[in-house]
Amino acid sequence: MSRVSVIVDSDADEERRRGLRRMRMVALGLLIFAAIVYVLTLGRDGIWGFVNAGAEASMVGAMADWFAVTALFRHPLGLPIPHTALIPRKKDMLARSLQDFMGANFLREEIVRDRVQAAAIAARSAAWLLVPEHTRRAADEVVSVSVAALTRLRDDSVAGLLDEAVLPRLREEPVSPIAGTFLGEVVRDKAHHGLVDLAIAEGHRWLLLNEATFAAVLEERAPWWAPNRVNELVIKRLYAEALLWVEEIRENPFHHARLALDDLLAQLATDLLEDPETMARAERLKLRMLEHPQLLATATSLWSAFRAALIRSLSEPDSPVRGRIEGQLRAFAEHVRDDATLRARLDGYAADLAAFVVDRYGDELTTVISHTIERWDGRETAEKVELHVGRDLQFIRINGTIVGGLVGLIIHAITLLAGR
């Protein structure tokens, strides 16, 4: 397994390094001071005997605590003494212990759920989103992601998806039940009446603007032996009747032509669901359309044009699409802000999601700790840990020096009292 360097110095690390050096100098200074006092008071009696005993005990305490602190990170004096350099040697075991500790005490469903609920994510998100610059920023992110996704989605990928997944599925799926059910619903709801009104209005407008074209079409069908004057009169009469008929259909919602169309569509919907011959014709028509060589190219071209138009619209700073996105984000945020029930439901969804992630992937999440630390170099790991906690550990050496001296004084006093 490769080892990864973890030493990435920052300004904070450099400050910690300076603090660690200062505390080491303080601890070492106390040891040197105790040694000097010990040498200067060596062999003296009376009060100096107490000072000498205290200095001697201070040196012992300082050296013992220096050994203990140093043994955590490296071999003292470079000597391979057993049970030293604990962090470099035992880092993998410590990593697994930390992993188990995190999993057992932090990544628990009830703890995660409680913290997510207490965070009030919905209310805080709505408040953040209602700030105008934040709304624009969120809309920019939505636009950016959408444009990136649309740009990366190539035409050949869409064509491949249609050819390999969509079209085969359409070939296998019977079209009659779907078309019959859909057409029946449309007829029952009279949803087609708007389209019929539009078609009739456009037909009437076309007739008004294209009398000459209408006449030319009929003239091509007129018998060659009929006099031109008769043809003109017949064509004018037919044009007037056609225009009148279309106007009647347009003005009368209960015109017999409209009712006939409704009956025709209703019968077609029934035949698509029940008549085997109609169903077979619908399937044959579907297959002819799907197997037409131009279908895939046409669908891809339509997609390409739609994508280009959408990307262009999204990329314009003041486009209606971007404004619509901002408006929808703001409206949703206001709805969340004003609806306590919705906020509670969204917070519940967030808590459920977090609990699901912890329950489903908690072990994988905590495994990141052990896997990452196992890849670290032992020596550099020890240096990094010492950089963060070493300054505080120097107080152990300082306290050992002071406490050792006090204990030395007590022991010397007890020795003198016992000798009397």
Image: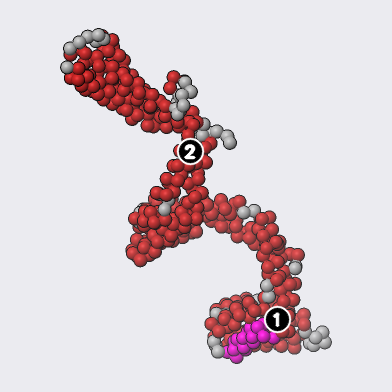
Name the kind of residue labelled 2 in the image. Met
- Which mark is first along the chain, 1 or 2? 2
- Magenta span: predominant SS is helix
Instruction: Spot the residue most to the right.
Output: 225
Picture coordinates of residue 5, whole percent (x, y): 51, 31
> Mark 2 touching mark 1, by CB under 8 A?
no
Element type where label 2 sits in the image: helix
Q: Residue at x 47, y 57 (%)?
A: 356
State the image quarter where residue 55 is shown.
top left
263 vs 348, nearest the viewer = 348
Name the kind of residue labelled 1 in the image. Met
Q: Magenta stretch containing residue 231, yes or no?
A: no
Which quadrant is the C terminus positioned in? top left
Element type where label 1 sits in the image: helix
Instruction: Spot the residue most to the bottom.
Output: 256
The residue that disc 1 covers is 279
Picture coordinates of residue 54, whole percent (x, y): 24, 18
Q: Which residues are magenta?
A: 255-275
State the image quarter where residue 409 is shown.
top left
The residue that disc 2 covers is 93
Residue 59 higher or lower than 337, as above or below: above
Q: Residue at x 42, y 32 (%)?
A: 385
Report the disc number at residue 189: none
Which quadrant is the N terminus positioned in? top right
Q: Residue at x 46, y 60 (%)?
A: 324
